[in-house]
Amino acid sequence: MALVVAVIGGPTPGSATAALVENIAERLELEGHTTVLISPADLPPAALIAGDSADPQIRSAAELIEQADGVVVATPIFQASYSGLLKTFLDVLPPGALAGKVALPLVNGGSRARLPAVDHTLWPVLSALGCSQVGPGAFVLDTDIVRHSCGVSLTDASESRVAAACHRFAQALALIPDQTSGRSFDRSLF
């Protein structure tokens, strides 16, 4: 099956964005895909801000993304756009790092007024970075993301949209030839 790297674009550990990515990763793993989470908040801030792609942790993250068949990019919406942390991380990736990848954009926020953010903020940047296929993403209200002792779930209001987006993403991944055999990557870096 496919290798999927999920990027948590929220700056706060344990945030609604992180919970949403955990939910998506679980769904993809149930379909047989390997998922690895990257949180740019865990990368060296000085190297990110300076655009130091030679930093070992940033280089490892970029290499992992280059190995991936698909990427999930999730972000909270701040000031009608994706997070500055996500922008900084995407800027430090080498040209073509997302070329040939299938992408699933996810956005979360506190108001339905942010609903267009998926199409107007993430979709264009992922296309510009070379993703061969950017699927329709999903917007999830922060209040629709529910943490439990056994994981993360979504309220009915968001469940069907997220399930449909994840299903379309998994279908697109299934069309990619299996390249995971013989791959090695270090999950402990993230």
Image (cartoon, helix red, strand yellow):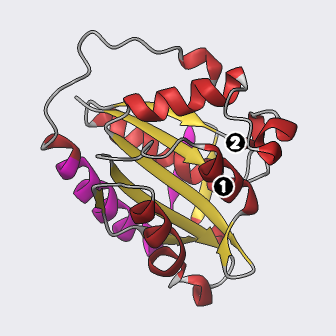
Task: Give the amino acid type for the residue marked by disc 1 in the picture.
Answer: Leu
Q: Could you classify mark 1 by the number of other residues whose Cα lies within 10 Å: few (under 14), some (14-19), or many (20 or more)?
A: many
Q: Is residue 57 left or right of residue 93?
A: right
How far is mark 1 from mark 2, CA to CA? 7 Å
Q: What's the magenta bit mostly, secondary-structure-wise?
A: helix
Q: Is residue 182 magenta?
A: no
**Residue depicted at x 48% and y 28%:** 64
Which image quadrant is residue 59 in?
A: top right
Which image quadrant is residue 84 in?
A: bottom right
* Residue assigned mark 1: 86
Task: Give the amino acid type for the residue marked by disc 2 in the picture.
Answer: Pro
- Camera sees residue 151: yes
- In x, y percent, where is residue 177? 13, 32
- Camera sees residue 16: no
- Label number found at residue 102: none
Q: Is residue 163 magenta?
A: yes
Task: Name the N-terminal-most of marks 1 and 2.
Answer: 2
| Residue projecting furthest to the right | 46
Front in this rendered view, residue 162 or 95: 95
Front in this rendered view, residue 152 or 50: 50
| Residue projecting furthest to the bottom | 113
- In x, y percent, where is residue 112? 58, 86
- Label number found at residue 40: 2
